[in-house]
Amino acid sequence: MPETILIVDDTPANLSVLVDTLSEAGYQLMVAEDGEDALAQTARTRPDLILLDVMMPGLDGFETCRRLKAAAGTRDIPVIFMTALNETAEKVRAFGAGAVDYITKPIQHEEALARIGTHLTIRRLRQKLEQQLTLTERFMRIASHDLRNPLCLILMSGELARRKGATPEVAEYLASIHSSAGQMRRIIDTFLNVRKPGDEGRGPAGRVDLNLMAAAVVAQNEPAAERKQVAVILQLADDLPLARADVGHAYQALTNYVSNAIKFLPPGGVVTLRTSATDFTVRLEVHDDGPGVPVAERAALFTEFARLSNRPTGGEESTGLGLSIVKQLIEGERGTVGADFPPAGGSVFWFELPISPGA
């Protein structure tokens, strides 16, 4: 289907030439002679691109563009200014109003067609990407929702097996299964409830004791650490204030840090969890005495699907998503994340959360 371009110009001669040129190029056209008419037309029909004259009676091009960008239905439509003005200040003003480009009068038709084609291509690609992201998110939410049922069965079966009686060794395995399945369910619940940046209506944050959480995460990861002969040590601050955050988000973030440390350490390694506080934040650090991260690769930390040269030492799977999830979860709680690499070696992955009021 041909794409639609709205031409806004109060000069009949300009309109006639543009209509001929763009019609021959195969575009569908809408025409408006002033800013008010343009706003009225776009309220009814959404063009794919707008060519907007700067100097018009009534609403000039700058104000028309600002109003288009302020309206939810038209803010994503690319606007190209048509102007006889050639001063830098006016060009900057055009971009400040929300334009993506400008064409200088007298209009060179080949240049105009090239610029229009470029911005329509960008718009098509963006729309396609948004559709793909929407479909992917929908699929992930459906899959996550459907995974909750078998996880609940695992939890229930493990609890029933525990009640039937078991040797101490089997009981320990059942407890590990129960803990891991419970954490998987919390991760799924977190994903299903996570809101996009900027979403309104967020519920109140909880109050989190990071000392208790650190001890719980260590207990959960103890079987994996024992299998790899990795020691996990707690060094927790006394009288640590409570953090302001969602408990599930903070728990998942810390679990990712600790499981990563165990995953990438060789046998005999040591992981140390430390807590501390300032006047405004509570900090949790996960230290390891591993090889660290090469300087050239550190900028890729906390990005999705980061592929670093360090690999898991026990054949574990690595998706490259763990640290990016930590960043999303903690920053969603108005916290910060980071990593330090001491000169003596090893790594320190940390996050900070605001102190809960009254803590």
Image (cartoon, helix red, strand yellow):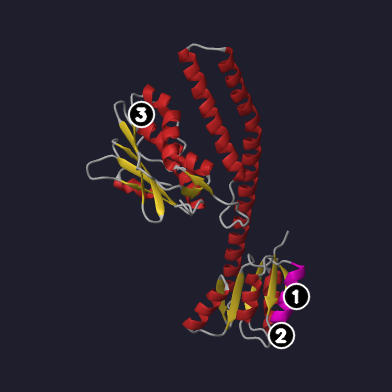
The residue range painted magenta reads 32-45
Mark sitting on residue 12: 2
* Amino acid type, label 2: Pro
Frontmost residue, 236 versus 233: 236
For image coordinates 50% across by 78% down, the residue present is: 92
Residue 32 visible in rendering = no
From the top left corner, tell me how far across and down residue 42 is, in percent: 73, 71
| Residue depth check, mark 1 versus mark 2: number of the one nearer the observer | 1
Q: Report helix, strand or loop for mark 2.
A: helix
Q: Which quadrant would the N terminus be assigned to in this image?
A: bottom right
Q: Is 33 part of what is drawn in magenta?
A: yes
Q: Is 309 part of what is drawn in magenta?
A: no
Neighbour class for label 1 at 10 Å: few (<14), some, many (≥20)?
A: few
Neighbour class for label 2 at 10 Å: few (<14), some, many (≥20)?
A: few
Pointer 1 residue:
40
From the top left corner, tell me how far across and down residue 16 is, in percent: 71, 80
Mark sitting on residue 255: none
N-term mark: 2 or 3: 2
Question: Measured along the vertical axis of the image, is residue 261 above or below residue 326?
Answer: above
In the picture as drawn, the residue positioned furthest to the right comes out as 44
Pointer 3 residue:
313
For image coordinates 49% across by 39% down, the residue present is: 252
How far is disc 3 from disc 1 in space, using C-alphas? Answer: 64 Å
N-term mark: 3 or 1: 1
How far is disc 1 from disc 2 in space, using C-alphas? Answer: 20 Å
N-term mark: 1 or 2: 2
* Amino acid type, label 3: Thr
Frontmost residue, 315 versus 159: 159
From the top left corner, tell me how far across and down residue 209 is, in percent: 45, 42
